[in-house]
Image: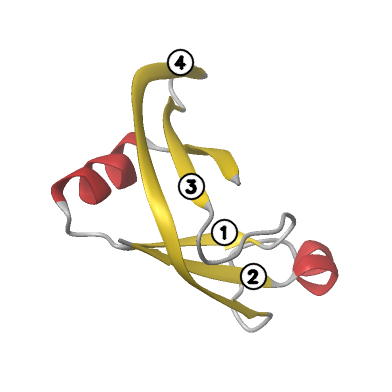
Amino acid sequence: MKIEKKIWPEYFEKILSGEKTFELRLADWKCKPGDILVLKEWDPETSKFTSRKIEKIVSYVLKTKDIKFWPQKEIKKYGFQIISFK
């Protein structure tokens, strides 16, 4: 399955360079090994997509509820997923 998600330029660049090989996302959607994660660069300053995107094959998904980046209500409802890719 192909899954499209927005990603900010600073993180897009790190993935493009190979420095970043995982993604932390709110687990409000399903993702499993073998899926293709399509990361579309989103510029938060212009609120528009750039023309760049990266496709990564999901190799592992770890779900947890112990990280505090999102509102507690959403964390309790969805938990988190940490996505590694190759």
Q: Are marks 3 and 2 in contact (CB under 8 Å)?
A: no
Depth check, front residue: 19 or 4: 4
Give the Cα separation between the discs numbered 2 and 1.
Answer: 6 Å
The foreground one among 70 and 6 is 6
State whether residue 54 is above or below residue 46. Answer: below
- Closer mark to the observer between disc 3 and disc 1: 3
**Which residue position holds label 3?**
37
Rounded to the nearest angstrom, the CA distance separating label 3 from label 1 is 12 Å
Foreground pick, 60 / 73: 60
Q: Is residue 1 left or right of residue 83?
A: right
Decide if residue 24 is on the left or right side of residue 12.
right
N-term mark: 2 or 1: 1
Given the image, on which type of amino acid does mark 1 rest?
Arg
User: Which residue does the numbered mark 4 point to in the structure image?
Assistant: 46
The amino acid type, in three-letter code, at marker 3 is Leu
Task: Tell me which residue sits at (79%, 62%) in the image.
Answer: 74
* x, y percent for residue 46: 45, 15
> Residues at badges 3 and 4 in contact (C-beta under 8 Å)?
no
Precedes in sequence: disc 3 or disc 1: 1
Dot 1: within a 10 Å radius of its alpha carbon, few (fewer than 14), some, or many (20 or more) residues? some
Front tag of 4 and 2:
2
Q: Are marks 3 and 1 in contact (CB under 8 Å)?
A: no
Q: Which residue is mark 2?
A: 80
What's the residue at 59%, 69% (across, down)?
81
Going from the N terminus, do you reach mark 3 or mark 2 first?
3
Residue labelled with disc 1:
25
Residue at mark 4 to residue at mark 2: CA–CA distance? 27 Å
Ranked by sequence position, the earlier of labels 4 and 2 is 4
